[in-house]
Amino acid sequence: MPHSARRTVTLRDVAAAAGVSVPTASRVLGGSSREVRPEHRQRVLAAAAALRYTADASARAMRRANDSIAVVADDLTTPSMGMAAAAMERQARAAGAFVTVSSTFGASERQLETVRLQRALRPRALILTSSRLHSHALGGRLLDELLGYERDGGRVVILGDTDMPFDSISFDNYGAARELAAYVAESGHRHVTILAGARGRGNVSARTAGFVDGLRGGGVEERHIHIAHCAVSREGGFEAARQLVAEGLEPPHAVLAANDTIAIGAMSAFRAAGVPVPADVSLTGFDDIELATDLTPRLTTVSLPLAEAGAEAVRRALAHPAETEHLMMRGRLVVRDSTAPRAV
């Protein structure tokens, strides 16, 4: 004899069981940033678990899953993200799927809210792109949400550094930065400034560490290595380079930027100040975005396989491997016109 379908549990049911208002239950289960009293939060979570509210909602969604791949990114405005996202779209379409993209600006709460929203929209897979995703973020709530999504049949892939137990693709930022810095040191530069980007940002922090070790290994004295932090943007690079010139730039000098966008801003500042590149200042970037070859002079940089990583993320999102895999891709030093050798 067939079983009758279990009645759909609503948010109102959870609120009634917890003895709270519907808006309060919604704030707890929807990941709102508004404060909820701890005792109310505990009652709502207990009621939702008892009524199987979250599990049932997710399971119903996954049974009706579509062919979308939801990409949750830190910042959609960066050229590097654009290159990866374009490759994701091409790979997804070739497999009969399509990509949707959301931006979180790297904020953990927004990442959690976006993942919860995407679960309700029932994508086939989630790809999170971020410079660093910690399993302990938000007390483990983001990890719990992603694990729940996978238990309900979804797939999670992370493009970036992470300690989470999902398939991931990352870049050897440290190793590539060390190679670039070693090249600069071998070219005879003995006074170097690193435009390091924002403090605490995973990928640029690894690049800065690689720059420093590569310069030291190449014979540059530590007292002649200056680290300047700036916004990870063209404007950040412009302001940092403008300040460097104002403080007195000792040519010949080398400036190593944490990414190409910072380097492009720095090049504009040097040009505005009448400081020729590479005659007085050798300048390098990182990523090898399309604009790097359109500059005058063309930018020496590290070419990261951003498009390859984006396509691989989609391939893994659509696959069902038996074990979790962590792939690290390497960059390639590309020497162009913005650097010049110096006499040692």
Image (spheres, helix red, strand yellow):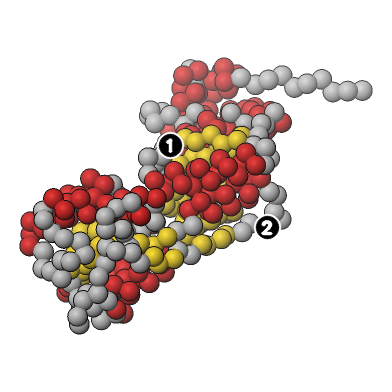
| N-terminal label among 2 and 1 | 1
Which of discs 2 and 1 lies nearer the camera? The answer is 1
Figure check: 310 above or below 3: below
Q: Is residue 43 visible?
A: no
Question: Where residue 188 appears, x then y in whole percent?
Answer: 23, 78
Amino acid under disc 1: Ser
Query: Regarding mark 1 in the picture, which secondary structure is present there?
Result: strand
Q: Is residue 278 left or right of residue 132?
A: left
Structural crowding at the residue carrying mark 2, measured as other residues with C-alpha within 10 Å and reported as few (<14), some (14–19) or many (≥20): few
Q: Residue sitting at 41 percent across and 39 percent down?
A: 76
Q: Is residue 257 left or right of residue 273?
A: right
Question: Where residue 199 appears, x then y in whole percent?
Answer: 28, 54
| Residue wearing tag 2 | 323
Seen from the viewer's position, the closer of residues 315 and 168 is 315
Seen from the viewer's position, the closer of residues 299 and 310 is 299
Figure check: 199 above or below 152: below
Figure check: 166 above or below 123: below
Q: Residue sitting at 44 percent across and 43 percent down?
A: 82
Q: Residue sitting at 33 percent across and 74 percent down?
A: 183
Q: Is residue 91 left or right of residue 274?
A: right
Q: Considering the image in quadrants, where does the N terminus appear?
A: top right
Spatial separation of the CA atoms under disc 2 and disc 1: 29 Å
| Residue wearing tag 1 | 103
Q: Are marks 2 and 1 in contact (CB under 8 Å)?
A: no
Q: Residue sitting at 84 percent across and 23 percent down?
A: 3
